[in-house]
Amino acid sequence: MNAHKTLKHKIHHQHKKTLDHFHKKHKHVIEKAKNKAAAIGGAVVIAATTATSDPHAVAVQIHNTSKEYLKQETANLHNFLLMLNSLIAHKDKLNPEEEQLLKQALSKYLKMDLKVELDGNRMNEIMGYIGAEQHLLRWKGDNLAKHSIQKAGMAPLQGAFKDFENEEQEKWYIAAPIHELPNWNQDWATLKPWYRFRKVLVYNPKNHRAVAAVIGDAGPAKWTGKTFGGSPEVMNYLKMVDGSQKGKVIVLFVNDPDNKIPLGPVESKLALPDPEII
Amino acid sequence: MTYFFEEITEIKEITLFIESNCDDDHEKCELIDIVKETIHHKVLDSILDLLDQDQKEELLLLHYNKAENKTIVEKAKEWVAELEDVVKEKVREYEQELIASIREEN
């Protein structure tokens, strides 16, 4: 057997052996933990508790009330959204039920038809860190002097979708990792036009600011540790800071077939206080 | 996907070994992912052996609830003071074991 074949065989063999051993040995505790996790998932969004004296001591709590919040008294919706930032602080991923809870809460809060999945398409993640992007060349002859927030600079190349259709799209664009979609390699010819300038809602749970934006580029690279990128205007409005103070956002599709929702800031009549302003 | 052991150490040897024995980039990534998952289970197994029942359950619960890796590490450190050493040792041990077994067969 050559080295390559042996390598593959050994890696797969040891993987199977290790996982079988692990699941057999820890069967009972795995089952107990899984059942508890399922119960939690069924009831709620999970929180890392801040109630202990040690801020890093994370205990998973069941917020039995969260589904009730979404059945909707305005006050309850407020409470849910006010809790959201701490609820997601220690989470890398949302499970499908949590995604739906968030979609419902934000749709109600912003009076928009928001979707996790639209026309059979969904992003790998709807929650993640967002990093600051530069301006993009909108079309031939464009330059930085023609943009606002010039200190952000301009990328030397156009975005993945080439020419923007209008100024607003570049002003309010995000980069989303569509190139990481599991079916991208085989379906890119149909996926690319679908995602091109697709309208999304970007929500900052820290200050409850939201913008309607378009997917204007593919990215950012996985190694950056960020899931999304935001145009200078998006980052500015959401008051997102890049680098060590980067924050998480929620990104959902906006179902707006008649293109009635303008790009830019979205305000709720149920407006929640911005903690930085109080 | 990243695993909590990657907060403590990197897998260098086996990554280099895979890179030098596999030409296909896609396959390379796939094999490294499988190795990482194997190591994750070996490391988790070693840590669970050092915990009592309640701690085991709590650690797995964090895992199933997809808590951030650094959170898992911080929690595990509360119970296992020498956590970093345990993880590093287990990772090196597996890397060497795997490489040796492949070399042996060739």
Image (cartoon, grey):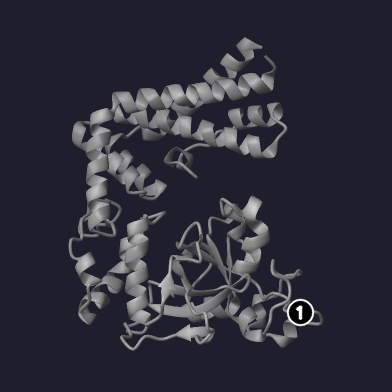
**Nearer to me, A77 or B13:** A77
Farthest right residue in view: A141
- From where the camera sits, is residue B89 visible? no
User: Element under label 1?
Assistant: loop
**Nearer to me, B46 or A161:** A161
| Horizontal and vertical percent position of residue A81 | 30, 73
- Say few, some or many: other residues with alpha carbon within 10 Å of mark 1 (under 14 / 14 to 19 / 20 or more): some
Residue located 58% across and 21% down the image: A9
Q: Quadrant of residue A178?
A: bottom right
Q: Quadrant of residue B82?
A: top left
| Horizontal and vertical percent position of residue B29 | 61, 38
- From where the camera sits, is residue A93 visible? yes
As displayed, is residue B60 above or below residue A253? above
Give the mark count.
Answer: 1
| Horizontal and vertical percent position of residue B85 | 41, 30
Residue located 32% across and 39% down the image: B76
As displayed, is residue A79 above or below residue A191? below
Amino acid on which the number 1 mark rests in the picture? Trp
**Nearer to me, B52 or A212:** A212
Residue located 42% across and 79% down the image: A209
* The N terminus of chain A: image quadrant: top right
**Nearer to me, B45 or A127:** A127
Image mark 1: chain: A
Q: Which residue is mark 1?
A: A139
Image position of A194 (left or right of A31): right
As displayed, is residue A58 above or below residue A45? above
Residue located 50% across and 81% down the image: A237
Image position of A10 (left or right of A125): right
| Horizontal and vertical percent position of residue A90 | 35, 56
